[in-house]
Image (cartoon, rainbow, N blue to C red):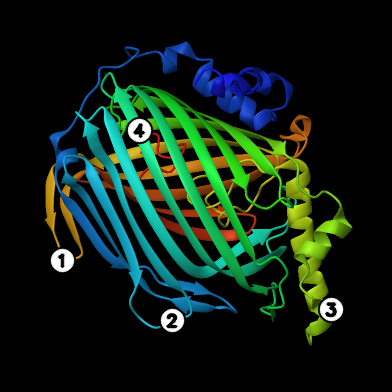
Amino acid sequence: MLKMFSNTQPLITEFAHGSRLYLNRKIKLLFLFCFLMPSIVFSFEFPPERSESDADNEIGWLVAPLPIVVEGIGSGVPIAASISNVYKNTDLLMAKTFFDGDFEISLFSISKFPLIKEKLLFSLGITDFFMPFRSYDRGIDSGKEDYYQTLEKYNSNFITFQSQYFKQRLEFLFRYSAGGTKVEKIFDVDGNDFSNIQSPERSWIDYEFGTQLDFTDNHLDPGEGLRIGLMHTNSNYEQNQLSDYAVNDVNITAYVPFFETHTLLFNAFQSRSNITTNGLVDESSLRAKYSLSCELEQQTDACNTAETRRINYWLKRNQSSKATALGGLNRMRAYSQGRFYAANSSNYVLEYRLNFSEKRTPMNWIFLGGLRTVLQTSFFYETGSVSDDVSGLHETMKSSVGVGFRAIISGLIYRFDLAKGEDGIAPTLFINYPLSIGSLGN
């Protein structure tokens, strides 16, 4: 483990001093407000006394359709079912497409099954998708229409071992995942599709190692304290033409109590990546492997544009790797999933949470059930950036502002966010906590 995290030391050092060197005025003010005012941050006992709720162990469930509509490609309506605390704190998640549609989804996962007296937890997941994935141009300056989409047969499996100590204040995680995909078609932004694809198949193996220090008052819904997480990921492709790379993430969240029940949250996230094994970095060689055979297509010009966008995506990824992307459920919620990416990324969040109710309210609806313990509204501001050159990471920042509605039901967090950014307004609906690293902090 010591060797594994040796590469993260420069990242932590840079993170600690980055505000002085790179951060713009807004980020400096956030750091000053949340970290350099001891009268605010340390006005409570640190670390705070740990609290737990027996309601987090109550069984809960959700059954709902998850319609997927992608303009110009198609639609599908899988049915999802989530059951929390079926055995102690073990959760089940299932999704399946039962109706005819353009997309198919099959998913099953079991999470946090106790192997050794709840000190060693086991998780398992199996996915099988036939659906589209969107790939944007690299960098913070890419436009919202600078992308191509792939329709893929995608499958992935993972196993996770997670160990917790000292009332979940110290956690360790190891995850192994393997998967493969076959591209059936590629679509451009106008909905034109191309199927004469070279190298349509791709496979990979990922290894993830993580640890988290949790000095908060509650593991599921913190109201005060500090949380620090590290995650190291090795991505290994089984094709010689693609580069393998490693990613190191640092995630720090501070919770400051306001009034009796409200909370001010500040989150800082940094991600760095580096190439471990080089793939093809010559454009001509990569084009021979990843062309779309546009001479066989009727819309030759549109095909050439999509082909160039695809070649550039993999060429720059082979040259510079890819850190954790911004956009989607976890960070920069006003933008599409994976919207901004490069070799380095950073993200900062300021969020104010208003707790309206902490009453124990039983829910026994047909599609949703359990014991609700928290009802909350939040207002958040996010800013982030990506760059292949770490020295220019904070020169251009994108922002996201919005409001969220949050409920905790039998140990699961249900949240609906509505965020606005340069690309417009984006709603997101998801389960569990948005500011965690991997499975840590969920």
Question: Mark 2: few, some, or many residues within 10 Å (few <14, many ≥20)?
Answer: few
- Quote the CA–CA distance across marks 1 and 4: 33 Å
Give the structural element (helix, strand or loop) at label 4: strand
Give the structural element (helix, strand or loop) at label 1: loop
In the image, taking residue 207 as reference, residue 391 lies left or right, namely right
Q: Image point 78% across, 63% down: which residue?
A: 289
Q: Residue furthest bottom?
A: 298
Where does label 2 land, which residue? 101
Do we see residue 220 in this rendering? no
The kind of residue tagged 4 is Gln
Provide residue 31's location: percent of width, then percent of height: 57, 23
- Which numbered disc flags the more N-terminal residue, 3 or 4? 4
- Which numbered disc flags the more N-terminal residue, 3 or 1? 3
- Which numbered disc flags the more N-terminal residue, 1 or 2? 2
The kind of residue tagged 3 is Asp
The answer to whether mark 2 and mark 4 are in CB contact below 8 A is no
Where does label 3 land, which residue? 301
Instruction: Specify the label residue 162 is tagged with.
Output: 4
Provide residue 152's location: percent of width, then percent of height: 56, 68
Provide residue 301's location: percent of width, then percent of height: 84, 78
Instruction: Specify the label residue 366 is tagged with.
Output: 1
Give the structural element (helix, strand or loop) at label 2: loop
- The answer to which image quadrant residue 121 occupies is top left
- The answer to which image quadrant residue 190 occupies is bottom right
For the residues carrying marks 1 and 4, which lies nearer the camera in this image?
Answer: 4
